Image: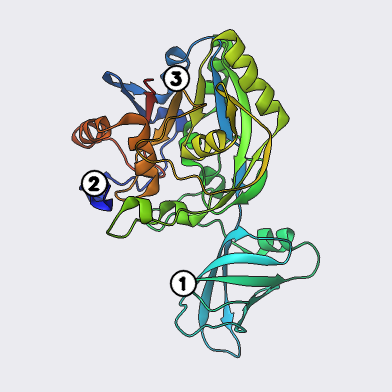
Amino acid sequence: MQATDFDYDLPAGSIAQEAIEPRDGSRLLLTNPLEDRLFIDLPDILASGDLLVVNRTKVRAARLIGERLPGRGRTEVLLTQRVDPQRWRALLRPAAKLKAGSVVECGSITVTLLTDPDEGVATVSLDAKGDVEVAIATAGQVPLPPYFHGTISDPSRYQTIFATRVGSAAAPTAALHFTERVMAGLAARGVEVAEVELEVGLDTFRPMHDGNVEDHRIHTERIVVPQAAVEAVAATRDRGGRVVAVGTTVVRTLESAAGGDGRIGGFDGPTSLFIMPGYEPQVVDAMITNFHAPRTTLLVLLAALMGDTWRDAYQHALDSGYRFLSFGDAMYLEIER
């Protein structure tokens, strides 16, 4: 497979540049067969006994703006992943004049590069008085996607209603459509909910370079599968329900924790699972997802679950005026086995 196999023409006008209200007013494309619905209709689409699995991670205020010392200009430090209590992975702009040992003062936080930047990314340490996460929340900004040129009046609009565990550099955007109204409808329908965690890193959204897809270095992200989710999946299997993943992050999390017979085991650690065509899903039966950018690993994952029919769905969405990417519309697909 070549990266060009996952390319398509995405007009700039199809990229959502505003967050619509209410959240559940976004469109929802059903894929088999193609049918145009609204997200508020989701309770009518799922069935009693199904299990909805969501990612409960919260976007960290990871965008730090500071000065390279001594007084050498503005620098942006975007924290993409906490490696351990002392070290972080960060995307630096501009990175050309930075090297291991460089220091950037970001308000109350001192950032020191521990490695030379590689394609703008370096390992850094953060020094702050008190708890570093509190310092980041105070000094930082929630990073919006680089292709989003609009504005949102409330930063919480880029958080899902499930967000309780700080750790992601970007929102698990498929869950941005959910509201308490949708959740009440799902509960009345008899759909249960389980929570997992995948700390979203920016590598998720980076386009693949030309060449073999198999040669692409997949991002590594931390996942947590709590015992409650393990038991919820097992109970769903026992009653004959479906496991419905909200977003690619949940798909990767559940499939990384697969324990056999459609069930999962507890997990707390890194995953580098790259789901591509030829992969046989072990846990996930259906997925809710947004429309992804060309040549991304997210689109490769979608193709693994849908086959070549993803192109028909995307063309229909483009022709029908669906909104793409993070603040865009959603689609629902069931996996045929």
Q: Is residue 224 above or below residue 167?
A: above
Q: Which mark is residue 5?
A: 2
- Residue at 36 percent across and 20 percent down: it is 336
Q: Nearer the viewer, residue 246 or 6?
A: 6
Instruction: Inspect this view and state whether residue 45 appears.
Output: yes
Residue 193, horizontal then vertical, whole percent:
61, 23
Q: Going 62% across and 72% down the picture, which residue do you hit? A: 124
Nearest to the eye among marks 2 and 3: give it: 2
Residue topped by disc 1: 120
| Residue 337, image quadrant | top left
Residue furthest right in the image: 130
Q: Secondary structure at mark 2?
A: helix
Amino acid tagged 1: Gly
Mark 1 vs mark 2: which is more N-terminal? 2
Is label 1 or label 3 in front?
A: 1
Q: Is residue 308 left or right of residue 208?
A: left
Dot label at residue 26: none
Query: Of the residues shown, which amino acid type is indicated by label 2?
Result: Asp
Q: Position of residue 140 (x, y in %)?
A: 61, 63
Residue extending furthest toward the bottom = 70
Q: Are marks 2 and 3 in contact (CB under 8 Å)?
A: no
Amino acid marked by disc 3:
Leu
User: How far apart in space, not on screen, are marks 2 and 3 (Cα)?
Assistant: 31 Å
Q: Dot 3 corresponds to which residue?
A: 42
Q: Could you tell me which secondary element the residue under label 3 belongs to?
A: helix
Residue at x-position 62% and y-position 26%: 194
